[in-house]
Image: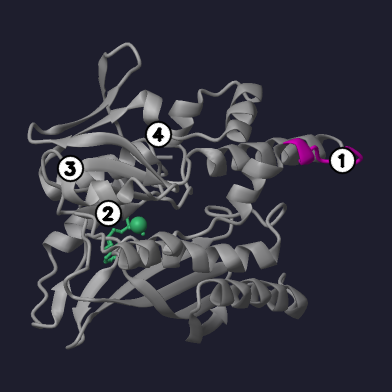
Amino acid sequence: MERTEISEIGGEFALIDRIAAATNNTLPETIKGIGDDAAVIDSGEFYTVISTDMLLEGIHFDLSYVPFKHLGYKAVAVNVSDIAAMNAVPKQITVSIGLSNRIPVEAIDELYDGIRSACEAYSIDLVGGDTTNSRSGLVISVTAVGTVAKDRVTYRSGAKPNDVVCVTGSLGAAYLGLQVLEREKQVFLADPNMQPELDKHEYVVAKQLKPEARTDIIYDFIEGGIIPTSMIDISDGLASEVLHLCKASNVGIRVFEENIPVENPAMLTATELNLNPITVALNGGEDYELLMTISQEDFEKVKNLSEITPIGFVTEEKGAFLVLNSGQLVPMKAQGWNHFDA
Ligand code: ADP
Ligand code: MG
């Protein structure tokens, strides 16, 4: 029998494309299936959006430095982020867990403390889930449901030439936080008497352990009457998401290196770790900020929102490019988390 490695067909994204190509949805209520941050379903007066994400111990988190409470919060936040990426407001979640016998009840209590805290922060309800055994460590799968007015739903596919490319918050910190935690873990493993040096890197570690979904921006957009032409959340690094918008919208994008927002504490950590902060913003992951394109008309209103930075523009000519400070154009490549390439 034929046997093809997933890496041979091009990794995770190619695999999803393959599944999507072989899937034929038939219901008229299914407005958008596989291929965006969330599926879109016609609920009559409005659209319902649904997104799901699975976190696996050893792949997405390491229990030696991630507290259960933070893990619970993050599992919810990353799903809410996908709902926000559709310009939708999150409403309910279900949470499924696979448990090994290493995990005591107290740890599950902590995990759900974090989950409930996120529910409070994002004004959503935990309405169900599933519980099962796992032989390969802790598994957490969250499904989030949200709603959006039909004329406000935002896909990856709506970017138009001359739109302004914008990003919320700042980038790169979550990846740097992970590098700090990994480094301290190695130090600890080598000498358990060493105390972790995390204080200096508090900012980036907090961004890694407790990322926030940008639902605040979605409420700002409703209030300001702003509808992005396209949007995606940044889970795999800016470059990967820019490429997704280009592909889905059939356009090109230019991002100016000098406009990519990186906060000072992230700059300092990057310098200490000998990493280029722009490379980290482009190829790191887990920032969970929103990347969007805004029409020239709406951009006038977006200018007043301090949490949004214009970083580039959409071109009719295909291709995603980074414009260096020198003016040189460099093609962007997706080097985000691609678990099947490892
Ligand atoms: P995100 O990073 O926003 O969570 P993904 O890259 O995980 O997005 O998924 C992109 C799209 O592919 C989504 O529409 C998602 O629902 C779909 N998808 C991912 N994995 C599968 C799968 N195994 N079967 C069907 N659809 C999938
Ligand atoms: Mg997403």
Q: Is 101 one of the magenta-colored residues?
A: no
Q: Which mark is residue 163?
A: 3
| Dominant secondary-structure state across the stretch colored magenta | loop
Q: Look at the image and give the residue range highlighted in magenta.
A: 192-200
The answer to whether residue 97 shows anywhere in this view is: yes
State which tag comes first along the sequence, 2 or 3: 3
**Dividing the picture into quarters, in which one does residue 107 lie?**
bottom right
Q: What's the distance in space between the residues labelled 1 and 3, CA to CA?
A: 49 Å
Upstream in sequence: badge 4 or badge 3? 3
In the image, the residue with mark 4 has its CB under 8 Å from the nearest atom of ligand 1? no
- The foreground one among 180 and 262 is 262
Q: Give the percent coordinates (x, y) of residue 325.
A: 35, 16
Q: Amino acid at mark 1?
A: Gln
Residue 4 appears left or right of 74 = left
**Secondary-structure class at tag 1:** loop
- Lower position in the chain sequence, tag 1 or tag 3: 3
Between marks 1 and 2 in the image, the one whose residue lies nearer the viewer: 2
Q: Which picture quadrant has residue 309? A: top left
Is 164 positioned to the left or the right of 208 in the image? left
Measured along the vertical axis of the image, is residue 183 above or below residue 168? Answer: above
Question: In the image, what residue occupies the spot 55% across and 40% down?
Answer: 173
The disc label shown at residue 231, or none: 2
**Does the magenta segment cover residue 198?**
yes
Camera-side residue of 13 and 72: 72
- The residue tagged 4 is 282
- According to the picture, the residue beneath numbered tag 1 turns out to be 195
From what the image shows, is residue 135 above or below residue 267?
A: below
- Asked if the residue at tag 3 contacts the one at tag 2, i.e. Cβ–Cβ closer than 8 Å, the answer is no
- The amino acid type of the residue labelled 4 equals Leu
